[in-house]
Image: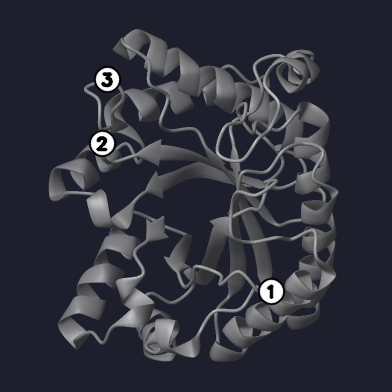
């Protein structure tokens, strides 16, 4: 589950911590990505932005033992003259690692990167994952990453590149190819696929979208790494057919289409804590937990 920044940025009462822990335990959430950024352009995060992180971590350990609290860190990646975080610069990547160390020193159980957009030729991102993995493994923590859904056809990627040059905010979809997804999976402990924001007009198409991406992603990396398929608990700005019901049913159909269960754990990633209503959780319990 992705959780809002206020949990690390503001003080909270014991009752608020207990309510959060109850949601996490009742819905069998294994990992919570607490927004602790975003990164500044130089790869740092001012400590004032996460002043309450230690209290949060201690409360989660006490009230929801066994649940991993991860520091969710992201930013818009620099492309040409657009974006804020230039991970091509070694000094920026070094600062990111220093930020990661500070988060782990506070007690976070892992680092969760959501740096966008990431294209399948992004070697700087791969180097960042290599360096971060060395740090998290040394500390006995986990490294997770959010990625866009796979390309529909890998062969289309060079066509996009030729027809729609990346130029600032105008760019073709930053979708990983199968080869790039495997490269990322080999460097992290968890991959969360941002399967939502599909902008499809019918519930049937939405369900097929989630089923197709779930089956394909788990076939590719389900034996290598823990996979979470992102599902939405918000309504898109435009009145499309995407909702939690259709997403969960689609993910389940994708899992059922596999010849066998993946070797590694898998599940859904709830996006997001701050948009999930009591009715949404009830739906999640019925459709996903079979309660």
Q: Which mark is residue 278?
A: none
Disc 3/disc 2 C-alpha distance (Å): 23 Å
Q: Position of residue 237 (x, y in %)?
A: 25, 32
The kind of secondary structure element at disc 3 is loop
Name the colour scheme: one colour
The residue carrying pointer 1 sits among few (fewer than 14), some (14 to 19) or many (20 or more) residues within 10 Å by Cα, namely: many
Q: Earlier in the sequence, mark 3 or mark 2?
A: 3
Left or right of 250, for residue 72: right
Residue 184 seen in the current view: yes
Disc 1/disc 3 C-alpha distance (Å): 37 Å
Between 249 and 93, which is closer to the camera in this rendering? Answer: 93
Q: Position of residue 51 (x, y in %)?
A: 40, 89
Residue pointed to by mark 1:
96
Q: Position of residue 25 (x, y in %)?
A: 33, 63
Image quadrant in which you'd find residue 262: top right
Furthest residue in direction front, as rendered:
81
Q: Is the C-beta separation of discs 1 and 2 under 8 Å?
A: no
Between 137 and 128, which is closer to the camera in this rendering? Answer: 128
Q: Position of residue 44 (x, y in %)?
A: 61, 78
The quadrant in which the N terminus is found is bottom left
Residue pointed to by mark 3:
240
Q: Earlier in the sequence, mark 1 or mark 3?
A: 1
Above or below: residue 19 compared with residue 270 = below
């Amino acid at each position: 589950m992705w959780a809002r920044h206020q949990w690390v940025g503001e003080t909270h009462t014991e009752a608020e911590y207990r309510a959060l822990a109850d949601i996490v335990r009742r819905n069998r959430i294994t990992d919570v990505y607490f927004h602790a950024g975003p990164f500044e352009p130089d790869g740092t995060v001012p400590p004032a932005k996460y002043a309450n992180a230690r209290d949060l971590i201690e409360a989660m350990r006490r009230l929801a033992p066994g649940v991993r609290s991860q520091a969710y860190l992201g930013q818009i990646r620099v492309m040409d003259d657009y974006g804020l975080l230039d991970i091509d610069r070694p000094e920026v990547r070094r600062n990111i690692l220093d930020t990661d160390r500070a988060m782990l020193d506070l007690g976070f159980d892992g680092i969760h990167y959501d740096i966008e957009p990431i294209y399948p030729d992004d070697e700087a991102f791969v180097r960042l994952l290599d360096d971060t993995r060395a740090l998290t493994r040394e500390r006995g923590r986990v490294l997770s990453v959010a990625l866009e859904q796979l390309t529909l056809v890998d062969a289309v990627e060079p066509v996009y590149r030729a027809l729609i040059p990346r130029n600032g905010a105008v760019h073709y979809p930053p979708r990983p190819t199968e080869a790039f997804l495997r490269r990322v999976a080999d460097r992290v402990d968890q991959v969360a696929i941002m399967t939502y924001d599909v902008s499809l007009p019918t519930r049937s198409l939405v369900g097929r979208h989630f089923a197709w991406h779930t089956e394909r992603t788990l076939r590719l990396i389900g034996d290598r790494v823990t996979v979470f398929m992102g599902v939405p608990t918000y309504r898109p700005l435009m009145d499309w057919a995407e909702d939690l019901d259709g997403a969960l049913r689609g993910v389940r159909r994708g899992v059922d289409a596999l010849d066998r269960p993946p070797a590694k754990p898998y599940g859904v990633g709830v996006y997001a804590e701050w948009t999930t209503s009591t009715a949404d959780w009830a739906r999640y319990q019925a459709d996903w937990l079979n309660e």
